[in-house]
Amino acid sequence: MTPDRHGSAVITFPSELEVVITREFDAPIALVFDVLTKPEHVTRWGATPPDRMTECSIDLRVGGGYHSSFVTGDGRVFSFSGTYLEVEPPVRTVETWHFNVWPDVEAVETMELQERDGVTTFTWTMAFSDQAGRDHMTSFGGHQDSLDEMDHILRSLLDPNPA
Amino acid sequence: MARASTTSDVFNAVGDVHRRAILDLLLTGEKPVGAIVSDVSMSQPQVSRHLRVLGEVGLVKSRADGRRRLYRLAPEQLRPLHAWVARYERAINHRLDRIEDYLDELQRQGEREGQDSDT
């Protein structure tokens, strides 16, 4: 049996414009890379009913694009898209990141994998290019509207299933 | 000049690397401004300005000690920030848990079908 690592992600904010998330998976690096980058896999974990993943295209090469769309149970649409800047299977991809709800935000996402003794460490970095992105991350102190917006964003970005 | 939002919420107050350095230092205990200045390599006016912002959001409290003023951390004001990070953490983990479960499922399938190269 593999250990249960549920809930074990480590999140850090190394600078004012970056968020870094790390998490270990008990699987070989090649499999983790495929699960993160192949549409036939991503569509299996990308959305939770009643939300649906309505689009998932990944052209995994430098200059290639990706695009994913989600429809939530109450009909809201979220989509993410970008262009690959670096592709080094199975260890690393770097891509631009655009989110339809934050049209003014430019970010670069880096996904890195490292395998040791059968355990693959996934490091996911979001680097916002300027203050606009960071403000979206932090400038909603206590206001319920913006907390709700952040919840929606996180749900679609990270878990489309409503809490 | 500080923007209004900087002085009105904890998120912006800790968004500045210099203010975080001051908070880190105050974690070790109450200090007069002079001790902060010598530790964080900023000028006294800069440190005073940052202390004022931190004071306005309630992260730092001060008291008179003879002719000096001593500054200390008021960490309970970090609660909204902690709540936000916890929320963020839950959402991220939920997504990553799904990937973990899916990887487990794929690997169990591989073993059942005898395609696991280790066996």
Image (tube, rainbow, N blue to C red):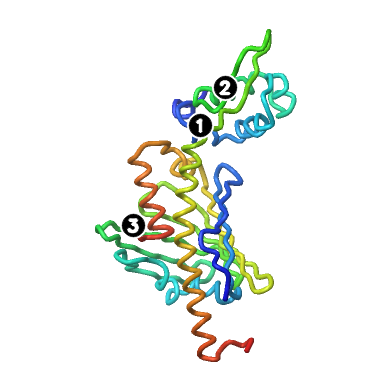
Q: Position of residue A22 (x, y in %)?
A: 58, 58
Mark 2 or mark 1, which has the lower sequence index? 2
Is B44 or B1 nearer to us in this picture?
B44
Q: Position of residue A67 (x, y in %)?
A: 40, 65
> Which residue lies most toward the bottom here?
B114
Is B27 or A64 nearer to us in this picture?
B27
Question: Taking A59 as reference, is B110 above or below it?
Answer: below
Residue corresponding to mark 3: A162
Mark 2, secondary structure of its residue: strand
Residue corresponding to mark 2: B61
Horizontal side, residue A75 vs residue A61: left or right: left
> Which residue lies most toward the front here?
A1
**Residue type, mark 3 in image:** Pro
How far apart are the alpha carbons under marks 1 and 3? 29 Å
Query: Can marks 2 and 1 be said to lie on one chain?
Result: yes
Q: Quadrant of the C terminus of chain A?
A: bottom left
**Residue type, mark 1 in image:** Gln
Res A124 quadrant in image: bottom right
Question: How would you rate the neighbour count of disc 1 (Cα within 10 Å): few for under 14, some for 14-19, many for 20 or more?
Answer: some
Q: Position of residue B19 (x, y in %)?
A: 60, 31
Q: Residue at x 59, y 60 (%)?
A: A123
> Which residue lies most toward the left here?
A74
How far apart are the alpha carbons under marks 2 and 1? 11 Å
Mark 1, secondary structure of its residue: helix
How far apart are the alpha carbons under marks 3 and 2? 40 Å
Q: Position of residue A101 (x, y in %)?
A: 36, 51
Query: Can marks 1 and 3 be said to lie on one chain?
Result: no
Letter of the chain that mark 2 sits on in the rendering: B
Label of residue B77 in the image: 1
Res A50 quadrant in image: bottom left
Is B37 or A99 nearer to us in this picture?
B37
